[in-house]
Amino acid sequence: MRKRDAIRLSTLRMLKAALMNREIERGHKLDDTESQQVVASLVKQRRDSIEQFTKGGRQELADKEQSEIVVLEAYLPPAADPAAVEQAVVEAIAETGATSPKDTGRVMKAAMTRLAGQSVDGKTVSDLVRKKLTGS
């Protein structure tokens, strides 16, 4: 507030409200993992909004959403290394014995378990799993 950083202030207020809403929804105090899930979902919402604003020709709103993402990402663990993500997917495929795209769900579950505690986009992992299972 004292720095008069309006974007940061509004983003942190929005985050606080989202955390409080989730606590009320769950009926108990959130642990670190649940809190990180809330932050990650807010980042995902912002990314979806950026895509929509860009398609709609509203670049100023997309820029605002991007600046909110920067603030929110400061409260997430560091992003997983792409090599680590690929390694987790390869290990998950081997562990589950997956051979076709029909096994994507099982591989995703195993890969996301291996990547727990790291900030990773599920869509990126899903695309990588599909690519590996189709042999592309």
Image (cartoon, rainbow, N blue to C red):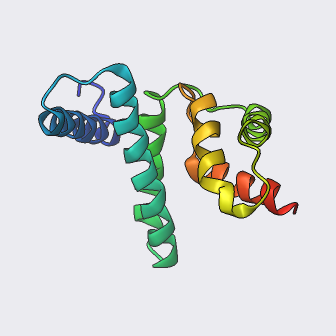
Q: Is residue 56 above or below residue 65?
A: below
Give the image location of residue 60, x and y in percent.
43, 64
In the orientation shown, which residue stands out farthest toward the right?
Answer: 135
Front position in the image: 107 or 56: 107
Q: Is residue 128 above or below residue 5?
A: below
Front position in the image: 102 or 35: 102
Q: Is residue 110 above or below residue 74?
A: below
* Residue 8 visible within the image: yes
Give the image location of residue 27, x and y in percent.
12, 31
* Residue 115 visible within the image: no
Front position in the image: 54 or 21: 21
Q: Residue at x 78, y 40 (%)?
A: 86
Give the image location of residue 121, x and y in percent.
57, 45
Q: Residue at x 77, y 34 (%)?
A: 91
Quadrant of the image for the N terminus? top left
Give the image location of residue 87, x and y in percent.
79, 34
